[in-house]
Amino acid sequence: MSQRTFSIIKPDAVRKGHTAAILAKIQEAGFKVVAIKRMSISKAQAEGFYYVHAERPFFPELTEFMSSGPIFPMVLEKENAIADLRKLMGATNPAQAEEGTIRKEFAASIGENAIHGSDAEETAAFEIGYFFAGIELK
Ligand code: ATP
Ligand code: MG
């Protein structure tokens, strides 16, 4: 059964001009791009998005980074989308990411790691709703 997940091409990847290459990898892996837009978010909006990490020591750095430039939030669809995107992204720390993954190819560090992907059905639902209105998701 087809499933939707939420992803963001992060500011580091957009700045370096990797948006199209990352999108190509995602589409080659069989994902349908249901919605995508280019936008910038404020630090407060980044804090709302990553609220589960609010107590973590890296939270200020993470939210500063996510509000540091344009991003491409998107909704992706395929069978097993959530787990398959996480696999395609690779490990959070690019030094540990497997060959062929997006983070291995495009991420510089654990803080600036090119792409976000939802980690469960509930987080995907929250994250899609945080960035997209129902009318954008037909
Ligand atoms: P994301 O949620 O962005 O898809 P993830 O699920 O692989 O990444 P999380 O544990 O949810 O990893 O952490 C969220 C983000 O916080 C990471 O993508 C990374 O940019 C940042 N982060 C996580 N751990 C650290 C750390 N030790 N130092 C700096 N930044 C970190
Ligand atoms: Mg995460």
Image (cartoon, rainbow, N blue to C red):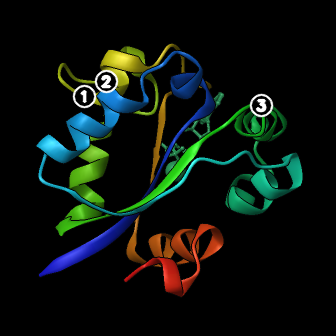
Query: Label 3 amino acid?
Result: Ser
Few, some or many residues within 10 Å of mark 3 (<14, 14–19, 20+)? some
Task: Classify residue 33 as left or right of residue 50.
Answer: left
Q: CA distance from mark 3 to mark 2?
A: 24 Å
Task: Classify residue 77 as left or right of residue 38.
Answer: left
Q: Tell which of 121 and 22 is nearer to you.
A: 22
- Which residue position is annotated with label 2? 97
Q: For disc 1, does the CB lie below 8 Å from ligand 1?
A: no
Task: Classify residue 121 as left or right of residue 3.
Answer: right
Q: Position of residue 86 (x, y in %)?
A: 31, 48
Residue depicted at x 52% and y 15%: 16
Q: Earlier in the sequence, mark 1 or mark 3?
A: 3
Quarter residue 3 falls in: bottom left
Query: Label 1 amino acid?
Result: Thr
Label placed on residue 68: 3
Q: Secondary structure at mark 1?
A: loop
Image quarter of the N terminus: bottom left
Question: Do the CB atoms of the residues marked 2 and 1 lie less than 8 Å apart?
Answer: yes
